[in-house]
Amino acid sequence: MSLPTPAEARSRMLQALAPLGAEEVPLEAADGRVLAEPVTAIRDQPPYDASAMDGWAVRTVDAVSGAALSIVGESAAGHDAGAHIGPGEAVRIFTGAALPPGADRVVIQEQARRTGMTVVLDDLADAPAYVRPRGGDFRAQDGLLEAGLRLNPWRIALAASAGRATVTCTSRPRVGLLSTGDELVAPGDAAGDRHIYDTCTPALAAFIARCGGLPVALPRARDTDAAILEAVASRPFDLLVTIGGASVGDHDRVKPALKSAGAQLVVEGIAVRPGKPTWFGHLGDGRPVLGLPGNPASALVCAELFLAPVLAGLQGIAWAEPLEAAILDTDLPANGPREHYMRALVSEGRVRVLNDQDSSLVTVMAAANALVRRLPHAPPLAAGAKVHVTRPIWAT
């Protein structure tokens, strides 16, 4: 049976997901969260015609070069707009203040001279009105932010300008990280001659946080079914991500252990390089599980290709692969039968594929800031050819 392409595998994964619940989140804690409900304006913004500059509120008919106008009041931001302006009158006004009744423009203070209770206007040729009209930013009942948007400081400012103290966001997915392998020790612990440091768990925890999830470290499990099931049962989570043990060797016990407890798989390998053993399904209780390879580059490339969209799906976000065009700086050989994502460096529209693509090399992964996508059986390419690249989350 042929393996699904990355796009086919993602489609199966996303079809098997449902967004998590929603909760009210204070604006100051909402950066990076995803809206579950839209934000709608409850009033006009600004709620009145406002001055864009410090100066003098006047009637356009009186805004004539050399005119001498009587000063009849003052309007400051947050206070009453002051007296009604009649013919030949002006009100001192400050940035953000409401225009007094009768006024329809502002003469900036640099274009006027005050003498006692009179202001004389200078040359006003081609001068703008310097008025921010009521509703100039948005009107009451306007839709400001759609459900499914990830909030950032600019969008939080828009919600605040609509008077919202809180927003309704999807719950952040709790992602249980299960790292397996008798050879692994935690960074900082004593390592024997046959041990290696667990590279993937801290890297994927950071990746999950960047995607809006909450990483939950499960106890590192030895390569036995009992140890794996005990670790999975140790803490609550919304999504399980396993690292390693994804292949078919005698010591790759993750899938057999979870299947023995009722797990059902919808993806059992993907036609992708690196990361062919990647798999996806549901535990016996229905919670989703994504199995990533143990090699660091494979794990992080497949996190970009599959974990990021799964986390997006749990948060109700529409996901699309972020591809852009770039020009090759180096020749590339023909590709094999699997879609290949090659670690690379991209700058100013040009991309250089790094020499060694071995999936165990952390140095190459750390040096890269892009992935070059090559389709199955793609022909050789010479320097100067156009390719598609993605700038992965883990490289930003």
Image (cartoon, rainbow, N blue to C red):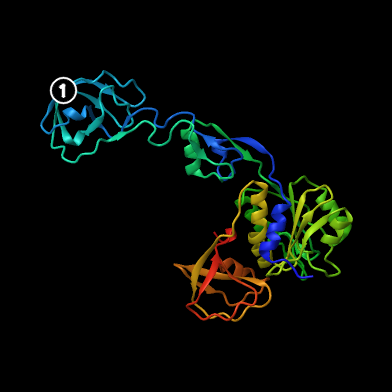
Q: Is residue 107 visible?
A: yes
**Relative to residue 395, is residue 386 depicted above or below?**
below
**Relative to residue 247, is residue 41 depicted above or below?**
above
* Residue name at image x 26 percent, y 18 percent: 83
**Quadrant (top left/top right/bottom left/bottom right) for the C terminus:** bottom right
- Where is residue 96 drawn, in percent x and y? 33, 31
Quarter of the view holding residue 336? bottom right
* Residue name at image x 26 percent, y 27 percent: 93
- Where is residue 65 drawn, in percent x and y? 12, 34
94 horizontally vs 127: left or right: right
**Relative to residue 45, is residue 266 depicted above or below?**
below
**Quadrant (top left/top right/bottom left/bottom right) for the N terminus:** bottom right
371 horizontally vs 12: left or right: left
Q: Which residue is mark 1?
A: 88
* Residue name at image x 17 percent, y 35 percent: 111
13 horizontally vs 161: left or right: right
70 horizontally vs 8: left or right: left
- Of residues 60 and 122, which is closer to you in this image? 60
